[in-house]
Image (cartoon, coloured by chain):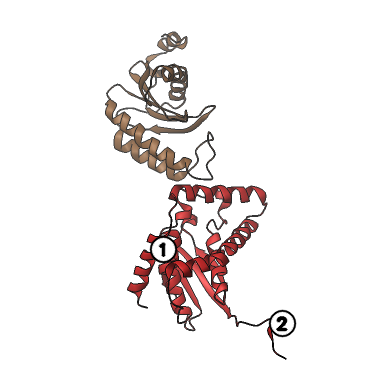
Amino acid sequence: MSARSHARAGDVAWGRMTKVNGELFALTYGAMVKRLLEDHSEIDEVNEHLEKMGYNIGIRLVDEFLAKSGLPPCSGFVETAEVVAKVAFRMFLGVTADVTGWNPEGTVFSLLLADNPLAEFVELPRQYRTLSYSNILCGVLRGALEMIQYRVEVQFVRDVLRGDDVNELRVELKEIMNEEMSEEYKED
Amino acid sequence: HRRPNDEAFAQLPHRLIPVLATMFLIVGRSEPLYELEIPTVSTASAGSLDQFVLHSALDLVETAMQQHTGLFLRTVDSFGDLLVSAYVTPTHVKFLLLHERSRSEDAIRSFFGDVQELYVKLAMNPFCVYDTPIVSKGFDDRVRLLASKYLA
């Protein structure tokens, strides 16, 4: 599928989704992050907790995505990246991301997000400058990609809230998981 | 009304009577949240006296709040050549401006309105706690910009 048709598929899928007020969404997420900061003593623990929550969301999101987008299976990791950026992000967050920074082997790429609806109105106080505020997104990506057999690690390498000019998520493919039948189904 | 200090103030030697600069203050329910001294072309700053004037005008703001239905309370007090104008947000955060008589009311109203918008955006920050001093540098920069736009 070409880039243009990905973008169009994204718009169509976005149109089909029920919408929620963006401010309510941002405020809800902010309240949750604030609560986590109160519950944990270390900021790294909060980052990890956000990632785990995202993972739980991601593993459920993929079926919804495939159902609502109606897209055929991707031809490989490269096309998967494009579909995630142009269709999935658009569908669930209303914004598109750009795919850049591929390594020569085609196993590591970056997603650049100009707008982050989660972080609207947010200004990080000094004591939280190591907080990865939108870390839930990393977990969502990891969970979703795992359901289509890609085991990845995702990290926020640049964050507008921490002073950078763009949000950058680095996605690293660790392993393509093979479907394995469990013991009961194996023929002797 | 006549403040007890007015007489003492009038007796100060002339060279000690300070010339008051324009000052903007945001006051929450219990304490001041934000303060900005706006140096204008014609006057010099006199620091703590401005604060005294503004704080003593707070009582009058409370009275005006009960009488007025709108948010902009206009001029609530005067001190010599200077006026105190006030604006109250729906959450009872008070904006006070100490200024010269020459300021147009529309400019002040617009200034208050724009600061109110900034304040709302600040309040939407999940890390901002209501009624605590405002420490955001972004807020400070933007209020300064508004001050130079409407009040300089």
Q: In the rendered structure, which amino acid carries the disc numbered 2?
A: Glu
Q: Which residue is drawn at 52% across and 58% down?
A: A134
The answer to whether the residue labelled 2 contacts the one labelled 1, judged by CB atoms less than 8 Å apart, is no
Q: How far apart are marks 2 and 1 (CA)?
A: 41 Å
Local packing at callout 2 (Cα closer than 10 Å; few below 14, some 14-19, many 20+) is few
Which residue is identified by label 2?
A184
Specify the quadrant that holds the N terminus of chain A: bottom left
Chain letter of the residue beneath label 2 in the structure image: A
Specify the quadrant that holds the C terminus of chain A: bottom right
Q: Can residue A136 be seen in this view?
A: yes
Which residue is identified by label 1?
A90
Residue A99 rendering spot, x and y as whole percentages: 42, 72
The vertical placement of B42 against A80, above or below, is above
Q: In the rendered structure, which amino acid carries the disc numbered 1?
A: Arg
Q: Residue at x 38, y 38 (%)?
A: B117
Q: Residue at x 72, y 82 (%)?
A: A184
The vertical placement of B123 against B63, above or below, is below
Residue A6 rendering spot, x and y as whole percentages: 37, 72
Asked which secondary structure carries label 2, the reply is: helix
- Name the front one of labels 2 and 1: 2
- Image colour for chain B is brown
Q: The red chain is which one?
A: A
Residue A12 rendering spot, x and y as whole percentages: 36, 65
Chain letter of the residue beneath label 1 in the structure image: A
